[in-house]
Amino acid sequence: MAAKQIETLVLSDDGVFPNSPLPVLVYRGATGGDGPKSFEELFRKNSWPPQWRGSVFNYHHYHSNSHECLGVAAGHAVLRLGGPSGADVRLEAGDAVVIPAGVAHQRALASSDFMVVGAYPPGEEEWNTLRGNPGERPKADETISKVPVPETDPVEGSEGALLQKWR
């Protein structure tokens, strides 16, 4: 399935959060907004095994050892991407966002029924959660530099926007 619209957002290192030269990809209308099973099937079909259902932490955090895809299965939310001075992105049921390793993200606002499905590329199913604490870097930067570009796009498969925009 192709998303109705794809938005990109590049977030620079802010001195605390490494962020990434790879763009965050926001897929508007990735599914019909009909619940978690549609995202789990979509991600599985495109070789990004779904790992969990839930929300997004309400504090700034990032993963240095994995890229992450979040599919909004229900409700809506505003995610702050890139740290405290980053960008706010409103997501609705049916939208998905791919967050490159190192990009800070936080749930800033959400509806009471907000739920996402979290998925990761093969081999990246064990992710860490870093919060921008003193001493995390430069080890986190080194780890981020070793995370490979995925072989497929979690929403659009082997021909997707991720492959075009991340290589």
Image: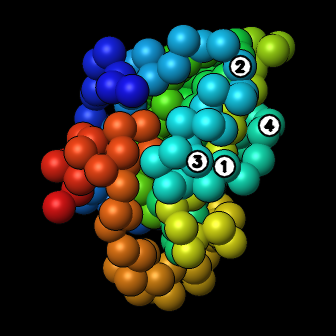
Q: Is residue 111 above or below residue 95?
A: above
Check whether the beta carbons of the residues at disc 2 and disc 4 lie within 8 A of each other: no
Asked if marks 3 and 2 touch (Cβ < 8 Å), the reply is: no
Residue density around tag 1, few if under 14, some if 14–19, many if 20 or more, within 10 Å = many
- Alpha carbons under labels 2 and 4: distance apart: 12 Å
Residue at the spot of label 1: 50
Secondary structure found at label 3: helix
The quadrant the N terminus occupies is top left
Task: Work out whether 50 lies above or below 29.
Answer: below
Q: For marks 4 and 1, give the CA distance.
A: 12 Å
- Amino acid type assigned to the residue bearing label 3 in the image: Arg
Q: Residue at x 41, y 56 (%)?
A: 100
Q: How many marks?
A: 4
Please, what secondary structure does the residue beneath circle 4 have? strand
Q: Residue 56's image quarter? A: top right
Q: Is residue 114 left or right of residue 88?
A: right
* Separation of residues labelled 3 and 2 (CA atoms): 15 Å
Can residue 85 be seen here? The reply is: no
Query: Can you identify the residue that label 2 sits on?
Result: 35
Indicate left or right for 162 with 65 as reference: left
Question: Could you tell me the amino acid type at mark 4?
Answer: Gly
User: For mark 3, what is the residue?
Assistant: 44
